[in-house]
Image (cartoon, helix red, strand yellow):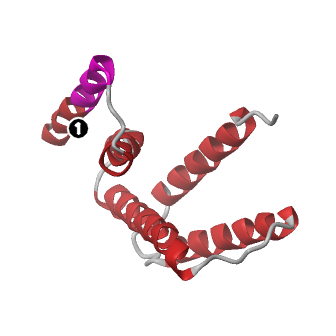
Amino acid sequence: MRSGLGDGLAAGTAFGVLFVGLAQVGPHAGLWPIASEQVSSAVIVLGVAIASREPLRVGVRSAGLPVLVGLGGVIATLLFFFGTQSGTLATVAILTSLYPGVTVVLARMILHERFSLAERTDLGLAAIAVVAIALN
């Protein structure tokens, strides 16, 4: 059985490089950094998919949710990019680090997962932190 630790570390490193790189882009670059990031990501994912030798067929009914997730990712990256252009990287990075909370909330809404008292407390504290950062 393969551990997800390596995949998690690679994904975390890639996110970190992406976020720091996007924060370094000058104000006159337009949306080219986002376009190049999206194209390079698509090429890497397609390469991994082809190398896995798994069939790449997806039914029309099954394609809706992954497309929605992809659009959400693009929107999130755009918001991060514009946030770093108009604000400080420290504030934007802290708010961006809270994105797993969205996954947890979606798990509750879509999969009807139940949260323990500790998990609800953590989500509440994260919400308070977002408000505190926004008011700073």
Residue 78 rendering spot, x and y as whole percentages: 39, 67
Which quarter of the picture shows residue 90?
top left
For the point 37% across and 40% down, the residue is 104
Q: Is residue 66 left or right of residue 71?
A: right
Q: Is residue 55 left or right of residue 67?
A: right
How many discs mark residues in the rendered view? 1
Q: Circle 1 is placed at which residue position?
A: 130
Residue 58 rendering spot, x and y as whole percentages: 64, 76
| Placement of 45 over or under 102, stated as above or below | below
Which quarter of the picture shows residue 41?
bottom right
Which quarter of the picture shows residue 45?
bottom right
| Placement of 61 over or under 103, stated as above or below | below
Is 119 included in the stretch rendered in magenta?
yes
Q: Please tell me whether the stretch drawn in magenta is mainly helix, strand or loop.
A: helix
Amino acid on which the number 1 mark rests in the picture: Val
Is 90 included in the stretch rendered in magenta?
no
**Foreground: 33 or 96?**
96
Residue 98 rendering spot, x and y as whole percentages: 36, 39
Residue 40 rendering spot, x and y as whole percentages: 67, 71
**Foreground: 121 or 31?**
121
| Placement of 6 over or under 116, stated as above or below | below
What residue range appears in magenta?
116-126
For the point 60% across and 78% down, the residue is 59
Residue extending furthest left? Answer: 135
- Location of the C terminus (image quadrant): top left
Residue extending furthest top? Answer: 118
Q: Secondary structure at mark 1?
A: helix
Mark 1 burial class by Cα count in 10 Å: few <14, some 14-19, many 20+: some
For the point 40% across and 65% down, the residue is 72
Q: Is residue 100 left or right of residue 120?
A: right
